[in-house]
């Protein structure tokens, strides 16, 4: 989930040899998919998006799909506010990936999530 088309398509292209991939351009687009019953093993979510940012989308996922919320990775070029910086610091390190994304590290995080149990 990333509002930047180039980042989103590049990341999808890099992940497709390893995983089935769907994409969305904002947190506001992905939450209704999950509410409607779409199943995913993990979510990669940009932090800064115009309609529903990554934190807001993750908080919404925690209500409708708590297990999936725990398998959500936040991608960030940096938090713009001290509040978002603190929030990122509260997440487990494997759940926060700086941009540009290190594909090897990202795949390792996804592998750990894949080993962690049931899908939401």
Image (cartoon, rainbow, N blue to C red):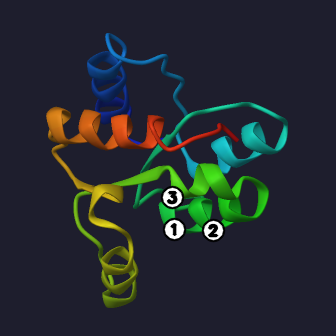
> Looking at the picture, does residue 4 appear above or below residue 49?
above
Q: How far from the left and from the top, in percent, is residue 34? A: 74, 41
Q: How far from the left and from the top, in percent, is residue 96? A: 30, 59
Numbered-mark total: 3
Residue 78 vs residue 39, the one in the foreground:
39
Answer whether residue 2 is visible to the viewer in this image. no
Q: Give the residue drawn at x 70%, y 48%.
A: 31
Look at discs 2 and 3 and give the one toward the viewer: 2
Q: Secondary structure at mark 3?
A: loop
Answer whether residue 99 is visible to the viewer in this image. yes
Position of the C terminus by quadrant: top right
Q: Give the residue drawn at x 40%, y 61%.
A: 48
Residue 106 vs residue 86, the one in the foreground:
106
Mark 1 to mark 2: distance in Å?
6 Å
Q: Contact (CB < 8 A) between labels 1 and 2? A: yes
Mark 1 to mark 3: distance in Å?
12 Å
Q: Give the residue drawn at x 31%, y 89%.
A: 82
Residue 108 vs residue 30, the one in the foreground:
108
Q: How far from the left and from the top, in percent, is residue 65? A: 72, 52
Determine which of the numbered discs, if any, sits on residue 55 in the image: 1
CA neighbours of label 3 inside 10 A, class few (<14), some (14 to 19), many (20+) = few
Q: Earlier in the sequence, mark 2 or mark 3?
A: 3
> Looking at the picture, does residue 24 appear above or below residue 52?
above
Q: How far from the left and from the top, in percent, is residue 79? A: 29, 73
Determine which of the numbered discs, if any, sits on residue 50 in the image: 3
Q: Would you name the residue on which mark 2 appears? A: 59
């Amino acid at each position: 989930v990333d509002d930047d088309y180039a980042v989103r398509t590049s990341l999808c292209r890099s992940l497709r040899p390893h995983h089935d991939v769907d994409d969305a351009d904002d947190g506001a687009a992905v939450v209704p998919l999950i509410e409607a019953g779409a199943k995913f093993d993990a979510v990669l979510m940009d932090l800064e998006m115009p309609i529903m940012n990554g934190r807001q989308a993750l908080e919404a996922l925690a209500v409708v799909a708590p297990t999936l919320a725990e398998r959500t990775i936040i991608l960030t070029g940096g938090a713009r506010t001290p509040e978002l910086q603190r929030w990122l610091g509260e997440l487990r390190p494997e759940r926060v990936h700086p941009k540009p994304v290190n594909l090897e590290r990202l795949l390792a995080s996804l592998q750990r999530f894949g080993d962690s149990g049931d899908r939401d």
